[in-house]
Amino acid sequence: MSHIAFIGLGNMGAPMAHNLLKAGHELAVFDLSNSAVQGLAGAGARPAPSAIAAVEGASVVISMLPASTHVHGLYLGQQGIVPHIADGALVIDCSTISAATAQAVAAALSARGLQTLDAPVSGGTAGAAAGTLTFIVGGEAETLERARPYLSAMGTNIFHAGGSGAGQVAKICNNMLLGILMAGTAEALALGAAHGLDPKVLSDIMGKSSGRNWALEVYNPYPGVMENAPASRGYTGGFGVDLMHKDLGLAAEAAIAARCAVPLGELARNLYGLHSLSGAGAMDFSSIIQPLLKDQLY
Ligand code: NAD
């Protein structure tokens, strides 16, 4: 069993760390939120007073932070952990961040002779709790084989997208498509409901027709259509509007870097941005249907 440092114990990181503990690993944990650290300490992890203290002596370092700026600060900032990571350690960042930041962090770690992967995830908080996440990995194939036992303790599907940063590119392509599909699904359901259709019946019709998609069938945005979807619990406990807005911003950045057009991705980014400005930033992203519902328009 390995000595793992886990940094970032939020909605995703905490359940992922719990699954590593359940698999029998020793964990040193750090988060800026003391209550998040105490939650893991209660389950048997060693609370560390700083990120530097967490990584000292660890053979594996895993991070799960909100955005590029946090990951850049953790590894490369003034109190960055890169010089403090033990020789020979394996480093896995699971945050969804820009490919450029992932590559900059990987370059600094490689310069120290450390093996590293970008390994963003898909599957949401439910997948993190159940240990059924999908990992989308960028880095060397040999490093992925070394990481596989740890990733398998937290997820069921592991894809090798390519070299350093490729995991992040694949992840944001997926999330750009998801953001567009959710906005389109919301529009179609709101239009049908405005004409008096039962949104459940309309969902069943589209689910067996050419408009079928994951947002409609697994994560339906219309309240009450799907018992376990965030829409049926006040748009709580899912993937936040602000995180979707961040990911669509990453897609826009990637498009500029590759001189590529993403018109629907940009439109979706603006829709989620406006929705966030209206006060919905912390709600689940399927709440993008709310401004479209007829009785809120008139
Ligand atoms: P979150 O905001 O719930 O958790 C982030 C945690 O990081 C917080 O506890 C925060 O205190 C901590 N943190 C921030 N800076 C830190 C630092 N310098 N040192 C230590 N701790 C620090 O976010 P989340 O929902 O867990 O998402 C994490 C990442 O996973 C994001 O990149 C997100 O896009 C991605 N993601 C989220 C979901 C989801 O459904 N929530 C799904 C897939 C991917």
Image (spheres, rainbow, N blue to C red):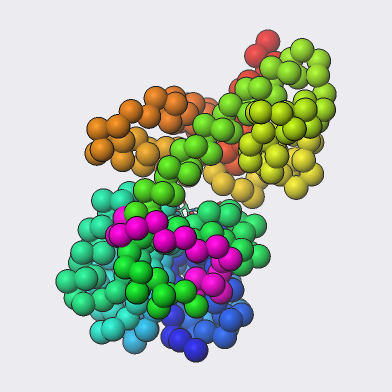
What residue do we see at 47% from left, 29% from top?
268
Figure check: 276 above or below 282? above
Q: Nearer the viewer, residue 45 or 113?
A: 113
Q: Nearer the viewer, residue 9 or 132?
A: 132
Say whether residue 103 is magenta: no
Q: Is residue 242 left or right of residue 19?
A: left
Quarter of the figure with residue 291: top right
- Answer yes or no: is residue 199 visible: no
**Residue 23 rendering spot, x and y as whole percentages:** 58, 81
What residue do we see at 64% from left, 50% from top?
237
Say whether residue 151 is magenta: yes
Quarter of the figure with residue 298: top right
Single out the residue that lies furthest toward the left: 111
Quarter of the figure with residue 208: top right
**Residue 279 rendering spot, x and y as whole percentages:** 54, 32
**Residue 180 rendering spot, x and y as whole percentages:** 52, 31
Q: How many marks do you count on the picture? A: 0
Q: Is residue 253 left or right of residue 6?
A: left
Single out the residue that lies furthest toward the top: 298
Q: Is residue 276 left or right of residue 113?
A: right
Magenta highlight range: 150-165
What residue do we see at 57% from left, 38% from top?
285
**Residue 99 rendering spot, x and y as whole percentages:** 31, 51
- Answer yes or no: is residue 250 visible: yes
What residue do we see at 63% from left, 41% from top?
214
